[in-house]
Amino acid sequence: MKYRNKEYWKKVVSNANDSVIQLSKKLEKERNWKKDYPFIKFIFVDDEQDESPYIHRVDDACEIIFNKGFLKWLDEPILDIALDEEFSNSFELVKSQTISDISYWIQNQWISWFLYHEVGHFICGHLTGKSKIWEEWTSYEHMKLSAKTKLAYEYDADIFAAQTYFRALANMIKSPSGSYKFDTNDFIKDIGFIFFAFFVYIGRKNPTNNSHPVAQDRMMIFLRIGFVTLQRFLSRNVDKEMSIFKSGFMESLSCIGDEGLNFTKFNWSNVSSKLKENREELLNNKLNERRLSIIDADWLRFNYLSSEA
């Protein structure tokens, strides 16, 4: 189904809700949660004008709010991909007939990243001070925070998102053969494909955004921190998975064209230098003491940001 109707949006919202429930249950188990309400609650607001996803702290739990405007914003490039036969037919999961409509699958993967990023603001301690709400892409929230500190929070949340996404990927790879209806190598190649497009799209929509890391840096964080996490949880070399992932990157570039060329100039040393600056800012603000729970391989406790990491 390459067109958008009420049923499409209903399923997209349902899938987002399912993703929140799944993540909430995972975190509840890790935290030995005994409350009669979920750790994370999903709220959908039928507002097409608001493109901001945000997280709201409610005592010791939180609410994730997605507006229809955000989901439609996210769907713009997905629709382009679905309508472009060269693009959509490049997916291994389509070639193997594992999925017929790529739209829902891309939505699920991209929403997962945003969900992990938003929850990262909560788990990492960004809302444990006086601030009770963190809303993306606005200028009026957290006016008491310096721009430098706010940017450091965004780097922190991006790293949490990469770690959480690739930890889930590690669990998928470790699952017994036959646990999934698709080949994990096909999945890895296709996520390389869609996340290259994802970060190019973010860069296109916010080319001069000073409140978040630039899109190229966000892609490098996802790639580098993600594969450090994957190697840690698989306890083995992940060069094979990295190669497959990057092949998806390059196929995506061939479909996107010149717009994606700047994203192929990998410069981890430059990104690493920015991460070290933002890590220092977080430590100065005692974020290592404000974490809501122990984060496995927390970059504020373990320094693995060298170019050799």
Image (cartoon, rainbow, N blue to C red):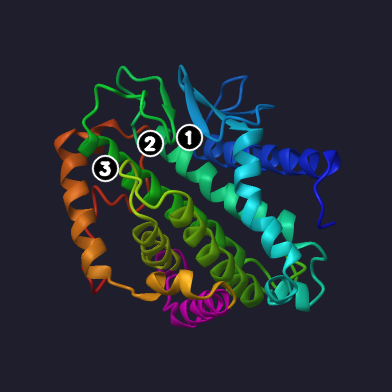
Nearer the N terminus, badge 3 or badge 1? Answer: 1
Q: Is residue 139 above or below residue 245?
A: above
Question: Where in the figure is residue 113, as x and y percent of width and height?
Answer: 52, 50
| 75 over 190 or under it: above or below | above
Residue labelled with disc 2: 293
In the depicted view, which residue is nearer to us: 137 or 183? 137
- Label 1 SS: helix
Q: Position of residue 190 (x, y in %)?
A: 62, 71
Residue 197 % position (x, y): 54, 64
Q: Is residue 229 or residue 85 the one in the foreground? A: 85
User: Of helix, strand and loop, which mostly describes the magenta segment?
Assistant: helix
Q: Position of residue 53 (x, y in %)?
A: 53, 35
Q: Residue at x 53, y 81 (%)?
A: 247
The crowding category of the residue bearing disc 2, from other C-alpha atoms within 10 Å (few below 14, some 14 to 19, many at least 20), is few
The residue wearing badge 1 is: 31
- Name the quarter where the N terminus is drawn: bottom right
User: For the point 83% across and 43% down, which residue is it?
Assistant: 5
The answer to whether the residue labelled 2 contacts the one labelled 1, judged by CB atoms less than 8 Å apart, is: yes
Give the image quarter of residue 69: top right
Q: Which residues are magenta?
A: 231-254
Of the numbered discs in the image, which one, if any, rests on residue 152?
A: 3
Q: Please say whether residue 260 is one of the residues in the magenta stretch.
A: no
The numbered dot on residue 128 is none
Q: Nearer the viewer, residue 76 or 58?
A: 76
Q: Amino acid at mark 2?
A: Ser
Residue type pointed to by label 1 = Arg
